[in-house]
């Protein structure tokens, strides 16, 4: 996350956090994998800026999603950037391995497929909306956990983002 913050600062990208969750959110999941999702999505947002300036907002909210025909209480995290956007035709292949517009020796086009797999393995949901020259919103829903379950169940973790990370 510190590297992401430094990269944002170097490109003059403002990082913003909005949190409408009323209590400390708990989700069911592995903290390392969920952390990888956040890092990959922020990195993708940063790389989408072809010029300096703009913003990346991380928005947390209580929400529900449909999973196996049932409504699941969840925490929704949206990464919203004001970068170049993604062409609608490319949104159909965005989760296919090696399908990247930013291929380099370090970027093979595996980030979003890995993110999608992690979210699927957590019984979550991911959705991407984008408009050319307007930006992209990647939303991830993760099933809520309960703080009382932590002692019984190791896969319930607090889902907090440190406010100080978003300050200059």
Image (cartoon, rainbow, N blue to C red):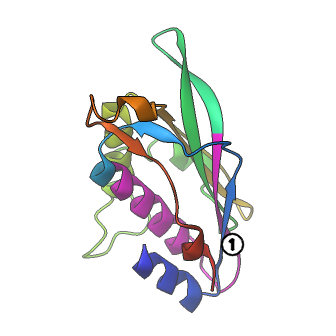
Give the structural element (helix, strand or loop) at label 1.
strand
Which residue does the image show at 44% across and 57% down from the upper left?
38
Q: Is residue 100 left or right of residue 10?
A: left
- All told, the count of numbered labels is 1
Q: Position of residue 101 (x, y in %)?
A: 44, 64
Q: Which image quadrant is residue 51 in?
A: bottom right
Whether residue 39 sits left or right of residue 134 in the image: it is: left
Q: Position of residue 94 (x, y in %)?
A: 45, 47
Q: Residue at x 70, y 66 (%)?
A: 82
Start-end of magenta stretch: 34-61
The residue that appears at 34% across and 35% down in the rendered structure is 150
Q: Is residue 88 magenta?
A: no
Residue 78 in the figure: left or right of residue 118: right
Residue 96 picture quarter: top left
Residue at position x 31%, y 69% in the image: 107
Residue 30 position (above or below residue 165): above
What is the crowding at mark 1: few (fewer than 14 residues within 10 Å), some, or many (at least 20)? Answer: many
Would you say residue 92 is visible in this rendering?
A: no
Residue for badge 1:
55
Whether residue 150 is visible: yes
Query: Eyeballing the image, is 92 above or below 132?
Result: above
């Amino acid at each position: 996350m510190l590297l992401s913050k430094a990269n944002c600062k170097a490109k003059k990208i403002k990082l913003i956090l909005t949190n409408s969750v009323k209590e400390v959110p708990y989700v069911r999941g592995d903290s390392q994998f969920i952390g990888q999702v956040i890092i990959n999505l922020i990195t993708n947002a940063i790389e989408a800026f072809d010029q300096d300036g703009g913003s990346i907002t991380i928005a947390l909210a209580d929400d529900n999603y449909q999973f196996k025909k049932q409504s699941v209480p969840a925490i929704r995290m949206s990464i919203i950037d004001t970068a170049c956007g993604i062409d609608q035709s490319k949104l159909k292949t965005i989760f296919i391995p090696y399908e990247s517009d930013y291929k380099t020796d370090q970027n093979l086009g595996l980030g979003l497929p890995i993110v999608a797999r992690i979210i699927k393995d957590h019984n979550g949901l991911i959705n991407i909306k984008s408009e050319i020259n307007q930006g992209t919103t990647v939303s991830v829903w993760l099933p809520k956990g309960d703080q009382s379950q932590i002692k019984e169940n190791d896969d319930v973790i607090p889902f907090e983002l440190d406010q100080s990370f978003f300050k200059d």
